[in-house]
Amino acid sequence: MRKLLYTFVTLAVIATVSCSKLDNFPQPNATLTGRVVDAGGGKTTIQTETGGGGTRVKLEEISWSDNPTPFYFYSMQDGTFNNTKLFASTNMISVEGAFVPLVQYDNAGNITVDKRQKVVLGGSAQNITFEVEPFLRVEWVSDPVVNADSTITVQARFSRGTSNPDFQNDVSDLFLYLNTVPYVGNNNYDNRYSRQVTYSGSAGNALLGQTIVLTTTGKLPPKRSYWLRIGARTTYGLKQYNYTDIKKITLP
Amino acid sequence: MKILRYLIIIIALACGLNACTKLDLAPMNIIQDNDVFSTNGGIQIYMARMYSELPIEDFRYSPQRGLNMFWIISPFPAVTGEALSRDQRGAMTEAVLYWGDAYKLIRETNYFLQALPKYAANFEAADVDSWIGEAHFIRAFTYFSLAKRYGGVPIVSDVLQYPTDNVTSLDVPRASEEKTYDFIAADLDTAIAKMSGSNQQGRATKYAAAAFKSRAMLYAGSIAKYNQVSLFDDSHNRLCGLPPEKANTYFKAAYDAAVLLDGQFSLYKKAWAAGDKEAQYQNYVKLFFDGDSPENIFVKQYSYPQSVHGYDAYMVPLQCMGPNGYSSEVSPTLNYVEMFDGLPKNPDGTIQNLDGSGKYILYDNTMDIFAGAEPRLRATVILPGDNFKGQSIEIRRGIYTGSAAGGISPLIPAGSTIQYPTTNIVQSANGSQTPYTLPNGTKMNPAGASGTFFSEETCSQTGFFIRKYLDESLDKSQVKENNEDQTWIEIRYAEVLLNKAEAAYELFSAGQTGANYQQEAFTAINLVRERAGADLLATAADLSDLKIIQKERRKELGFENKIWWDLKRWRILDKEQNNSLYRVMMPFYVAENYKYFFDVRKDEKNRFYNFDPKWYYEQIPTDEINKSHSLKQNPGY
């Protein structure tokens, strides 16, 4: 009986101890929102894809170290970003994606361009805008048209987004993406119907500024909605895509 | 009283004597330097450990599970486009990242290099030199394994002391990629200078180091020439990428290293005979099994039961499956098979399976279409109907039961990914088949004994199986995991010839004059082709494109776990695997006239391949990044 009592007391002590609060730091409550816009093209946001192939925000926290391990988070596919769970801190913030890099180096490793923004997070939400030059501007020329054979034809155009010759690499791919949900891009498309055109060498450059007609492959099932988007990319660096915005079309 | 006095004296003496014993002893249960570095046996044990850790991508490597792992499903060839596999659904980069084990091995080499000179008096001077060379080779091999994955890596060339007061001295930052390759070259130069031309089997020689140098420097040259990615750290070190102007320096180093092997090794031709395709085929098969092959430069041996692998168990055709299952893990693609000479081809280089009017060409046997194939193809890939282990390997997708009058039109439209129609075709879901009765009354299973089934995936996925390295003498009952012990040939002379040809061609096309590079490249390529039984280049001028050398490399070194790295260093893998489907060739039997036709199509299982360009430089393990204040991650991760 006494043993039982001791056991209960011990357990009670342990239970009480476990109540003590060890995590006495404030929760991350700083908010960073913003968008990446085309510096030249009417300040529209730079369309991207979600995840690894898209635009990402890079935070280098310099509150306590000159040489921090960066923290990344990805932008949404419309080119805006929002993170409400950041710690209060001082950061050098930049974005990486299918546009002229914000930090550039010469051949000797000297920084020649540095458009990072120093931002103190904490308190009220920070809203920042990055003006960048996309490698390619991809645009709709007209609205998608449904053909009699259950395919969709679109007209598109791509052109250089930068006049800096160092970033005018050969155009290598043009892609008409189709998906059955509003999330569409190189990371997320239906490969039965999407249409890819590849250019070897500099062949794609001749099409800059031209109107290009693309048609989906296969026969689309009727009476449902599809989301379409066009992407194009150059051979620069990690070869990420630039995109148009997304158009929805419903087959009769 | 007297007794007490004696007792005190005895105790005092006993304690005093004891106190004279030295307590500061090396632990008796740990082997000390002077145990290891005093006999040849000790050195051999130390070497054995280092060699066993050497990052050789052999029968026990897959990108999914890393090095030294017996279970090689998700096989490497199914990542490169050489093959398709039921366990690999698309492109990938390595899932197990080689980093920590590398620095363990580097520490062992550094320790060896530091300790051995202190004990040099125990040995012959020539032996000491040779061992020092060997340790440099092992260190260079390890650093190259890192450099080809990550670019510039931290260079540790001494034994780091820990525990230490100065922890920051352990936090070594990445060196530039250029310094890393130069370090590898310097280590290999030491190895070449210090080692002799012969050594125990499975250990490095002067020539292994030279051959390896040609490989590593060729890689560096290609990166200098073709890489697009750049990454600098704050100290102006270029961690990813090499200066383009150094490309020729590296190609020249690769060429010069390859030349060192001239006359020392030769292509295996013991069973070869000019103009005899059967002999050339047999010769090519044997080259992977002859322990005395003049082509072997550096090998990794296996021995049952201490050190084993399961290559045959995973790779044999379904009808040769061993008692514990598996088989059919790798099915070579038609894209791979089409690279070989001697097949009927369309003008665009694809295999010709249709006649002029767009109907299938009919054959009596499935091997007929391959009658003129270069012998190397048969020795690399098991073709449908070819003989293996004394039986015909039967691969058939189905039986065509429709009318053959006027020819048979393609079953599905060209380029389509749809399934085969069910009208006029009988097929099987798996190995338990219902025989179909042919017009003459005989019965035939719709699919072959090794496939291809439309549901069950343990069968040929493409119409082919792998042949290279499979042990034909292994009894069916022994085709089991962890039961095989073929030797892995890590470096053979054919690769050195190809390294030489490529380096020479790059130097020639860059306008370099130091040797007759064009002629040297031409000679090397033709040596490889002649042994393979392939069509020879007529003149040196015919070697007009790097693609010719690339193709030769893919044919000669296919399924030897080298091609992925080649496709990466040429920076062409993201173009090859750009939303790509590989092609397959399916044999069908025509019931009406007892003949075969071949349908060529895109992979039925719709395995799309997409290589992400950021994978050219792999991700440094994130826990290593988190541990260090100075380690910088590669771009895109």
Image (spheres, coloured by chain):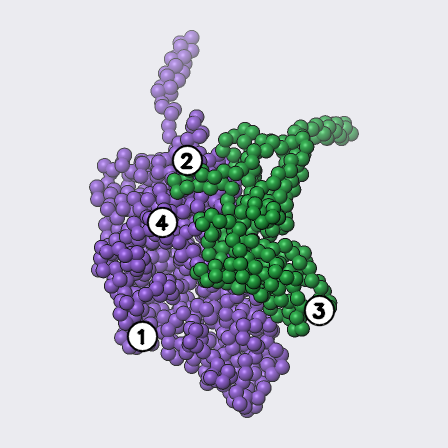
Chain colours: A green, B purple
- Image-quadrant location for residue B237: top left
Q: Determine the chain carrying the residue at label 1.
A: B
Which residue is denoted by mark 3 in the rendering? A222
Q: Determine the chain carrying the residue at label 2.
A: B
Which residue is denoted by mark 2 in the rendering? B235
Query: Tag 3, which secondary structure?
Result: loop
Alpha carbon separation for disc pair 4 and 1: 45 Å
Q: Are marks 4 and 1 on the same chain?
A: yes
Left-right relation of A81 to B361:
right
Alpha carbon separation for disc pair 3 and 1: 60 Å
Please name the amino acid that badge 4 sits on. Answer: Pro
- Front tag of 2 and 4: 4
Alpha carbon separation for disc pair 2 and 3: 59 Å
Q: Determine the chain carrying the residue at label 4.
A: B
Alpha carbon separation for disc pair 2 and 4: 20 Å
Are the residues flagged by discs 2 and 3 in contact, CB closer than 8 Å?
no
Image height of B532 relative to B223, above or below:
below
Alpha carbon separation for disc pair 4 and 3: 53 Å
- Front tag of 2 and 1: 2
Which residue is denoted by mark 1 in the rendering? B279
Alpha carbon separation for disc pair 2 and 1: 59 Å
Q: Are marks 3 and 1 on the same chain?
A: no
Image height of A188 relative to B606, above or below:
above
